[in-house]
Image (cartoon, grey):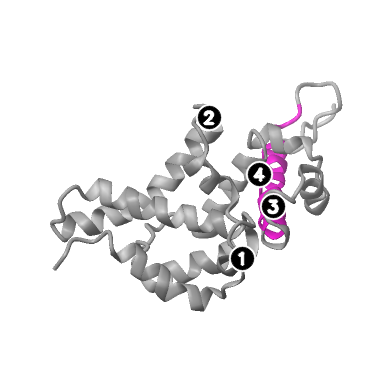
Amino acid sequence: MTDATPDATPEAGNGPEPAAPRRRDAARSRELLIRAATELFAERGFERTTIREIGDRAGVDPALIARYFGGKTQLYLAAVQMELGDTAPADLLEEDRLRGLLERFSRRGPGPTFQAAVLPGDNTEVQRAARTYLHERLVQPLQDRFTAERADRPRLRAELAAAAFAGIVLARTSGAFGELAEADSEDLLPLLHDLLAASRPAR
């Protein structure tokens, strides 16, 4: 009689394969895609980066982008979220926050989040996600500041400032404003800060 060994490996065809390796592969593929997307968006911007290029950089099938994320825009949002983390951001009137955003958008372009601020709404899942992100990362921190400062209509003031910022970011890449497009972020920073600060209540 042959003794049974508890850790014997089942022969092929004796039942389904364990699911854990497949789940680990999916998690690894998602991680590789987000990393590749982050690198490519930084190098080329959102519009000039293709799904195929992201898949090639990640070393996985580009079709997995649709499976795991839904599309390039959702992957962009996932990449930004991973880069920034879950910590609540400072508001746009904080100089370091404003500088960081200007530098990032100078390298990558505005991406779909800011396009959602100005394009007519089609209420798709993608646009809703982009707008939610826009409000959570830009509008809400400003609203919290204005509320703490006892400003009247703090939400309106916050949306006004965020809309002005989004419009300027998009205008820098439109080709319509030459000097604005060529301005260095450090030169633009104090002027933009003064413009946004105008939404604060008078002291």
Distance from disc 2 to disc 1, alpha carbons, whole Å, reads 35 Å
Magenta segment, which residues?
A: 17-41
Query: In the displayed structure, does residue 170 sit left or right of residue 40?
Result: left
According to the picture, the residue beneath numbered tag 2 turns out to be: 125
Marks 2 and 4, the one that precedes in the sequence: 4
Q: Which residue is mark 1?
A: 178
Is label 3 or label 2 in front? 2
Front residue of 40 and 48: 48
Residue at image mark 4: 27
For mark 3, give the secondary structure: helix
Q: Residue at x 30, y 65 (%)?
A: 197
CA distance for labels 1 and 3: 29 Å
Q: Earlier in the sequence, mark 1 or mark 3?
A: 3
Provide the residue designation for mark 3.
37
Label 3 neighbour load within 10 Å: few <14, some 14-19, many 20+: many
Q: In percent of the image, x 47 and y 53: which residue is there? A: 166
Quick check: is 94 in the magenta stretch? no
Pointer 3 or 4: first along the chain: 4
**Residue 111 locus on image (x, y percent):** 60, 50
Nearer the N terminus, badge 4 or badge 1? 4
